[in-house]
C-alpha cells in the first residue's frame, strides 16, 4: 500500500451504523454512497464521490449473508471500475464461515466459494474478526488481517473481579479458543460435548470438567439460536456453578435466540457490534469494535505492524 494515496471509506447499508463509528475513530468522514432498489428485488449500489487513485475501504458485515455479501461485491466492482488504487474490504462478521469443510458427502465449502467471489471482484486485502475457523484465511490469495476480539473481552473479564473463574467451550470446536483464554487468565477450563442430529438442534450435551462453586464464562465466536449456550448454562448451575456468563464475538441471534436468553439462567451475554442487535435485551451487553478496527486500518495504511494491536491473546 502507498501511504501517499488518499484514503476513503464506504459502507454497505446494513453496516452503516458500525462504519460511522469506525471512521469517527479514524478521524475522517464516511464516503457518500447510495443504493437503488428495483421492484423485483435487484439492487445497484453507487459510490457518489470520486475514488480515482484512492485507497478504498469498504465496510460490510455479511448478515444475513446473501444480500449484504452481494452488495459488497457490487461496491468492490464499482470502486475498481472507478479507478480506485486499492480496494480493501472490512468484514467484521464473515458469513458462510461455518461451511469451512466438507463434513458430509455432496455439500459445498461455502467459505471458500465466498473467498473466490471476493477475489474475482478484485479485492486487494481483507480485514475480518474472529473467523469460525482460522483456516479460512488460507482460502484467500490476498493479505488477510484476522482481528481478535480478545483485547476487548479480556479487559471486560478482568473488570468483573470474579474469583474462581472457569473458562468453558460450548463445543469441541472451540477448545483452542477457550484454552487460550484459560492460559491468559490463569484459570481452569471445561468442555462441553454436544451431538447434533441437524443444524441448530442439539440432541445430546455433556459437560467435561469441574464447575461446582465456580464462576463460569462460556467463550464462543458466535451465538446463533442460543440453544446450546442456554442449555449449557442450565446444566452448569444444576452441577453447582455459582454463575454463568456467555461471551461471543458475533451476535447472529436468529430464531428464538432473544427469548431463550431472556428466559435463561445466564447472568449476561457479552457480544460485539459486528452485527446489530435486532431487539434490546437487559441480559445482552454490547462492546464496540470500532476503535479496534480504526486502529488496525490506520496502522495497515501507514505500513506499521499490527501485531501489538489486533489481539491481546491469540486462540
Image: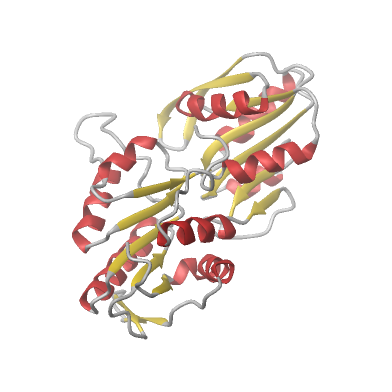
Q: How is the image coloured?
A: secondary structure
Q: Quadrant of residue 121?
A: bottom left
Q: Nearer the viewer, residue 211 or 40?
A: 211
Q: Quadrant of the N terminus?
A: bottom left
- Judge left or right: residue 136 versus residue 26: left
> Compared with residue 186, is residue 19 higher up or lower down, i.e. above or below?
below
| Residue 264 showing in the rendered view | no
Total number of numbered discs in the rendering: 0
Q: Residue furthest bottom?
A: 49
Q: Quadrant of residue 162?
A: top right
Residue 246 on image: x %, y %? 65, 37
What residue appears at the point 46 percent right and 38 percent down from the top-left corner? 200
Q: Nearer the viewer, residue 124 or 252?
A: 124
| Residue 279 showing in the rendered view | yes
What residue appears at the point 68 percent right and 21 percent down from the top-left corner? 187
> Compared with residue 158, is residue 184 higher up or lower down, i.e. above or below?
above
Amino acid at each position: 500500500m502507498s501511504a501517499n494515496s488518499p484514503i476513503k471509506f464506504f459502507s454497505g447499508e446494513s453496516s452503516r451504523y458500525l462504519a460511522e463509528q469506525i471512521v469517527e475513530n479514524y478521524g475522517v468522514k464516511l464516503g457518500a454512497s447510495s443504493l437503488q432498489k428495483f421492484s423485483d428485488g435487484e439492487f445497484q449500489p453507487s459510490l457518489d464521490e470520486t475514488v480515482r487513485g484512492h485507497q478504498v475501504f469498504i465496510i460490510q458485515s455479511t448478515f444475513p449473508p446473501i444480500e449484504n455479501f452481494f452488495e459488497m461485491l457490487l461496491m468492490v466492482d464499482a470502486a475498481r471500475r472507478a479507478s480506485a488504487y486499492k480496494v480493501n474490504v472490512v468484514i467484521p462478521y464473515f458469513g458462510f464461515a461455518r461451511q469451512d469443510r466438507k463434513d458430509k458427502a455432496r455439500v459445498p465449502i461455502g467459505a471458500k466459494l465466498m473467498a473466490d467471489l471476493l477475489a474475482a471482484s478484485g479485492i486487494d486485502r481483507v480485514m475480518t474478526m474472529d473467523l469460525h475457523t482460522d483456516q479460512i484465511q488460507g482460502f484467500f490469495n490476498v493479505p488477510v488481517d484476522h482481528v481478535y476480539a480478545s483485547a476487548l473481552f479480556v479487559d471486560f473479564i478482568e473488570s468483573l473481579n470474579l474469583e474462581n473463574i472457569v473458562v468453558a467451550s460450548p463445543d469441541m470446536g472451540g477448545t483452542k479458543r477457550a484454552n487460550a483464554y484459560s492460559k491468559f487468565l490463569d484459570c481452569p477450563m471445561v468442555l462441553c460435548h454436544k451431538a447434533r442430529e441437524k443444524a441448530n438442534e442439539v440432541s445430546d450435551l455433556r459437560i467435561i470438567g469441574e464447575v461446582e462453586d465456580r464462576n463460569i464464562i462460556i467463550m464462543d465466536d458466535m451465538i446463533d439460536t442460543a440453544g446450546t449456550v442456554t442449555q449449557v448454562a442450565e446444566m452448569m448451575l444444576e452441577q453447582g456453578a455459582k454463575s454463568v456468563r456467555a461471551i461471543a464475538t458475533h451476535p447472529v441471534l436468529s430464531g428464538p435466540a432473544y427469548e431463550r436468553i431472556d428466559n435463561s439462567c445466564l447472568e449476561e451475554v457479552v457480544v460485539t457490534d459486528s452485527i446489530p442487535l435486532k431487539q434490546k435485551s437487559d441480559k445482552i451487553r454490547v462492546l464496540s469494535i470500532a476503535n479496534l478496527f480504526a486502529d488496525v486500518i490506520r496502522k495497515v495504511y501507514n505500513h506499521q505492524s499490527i501485531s501489538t494491536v489486533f489481539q491481546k491473546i491469540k486462540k
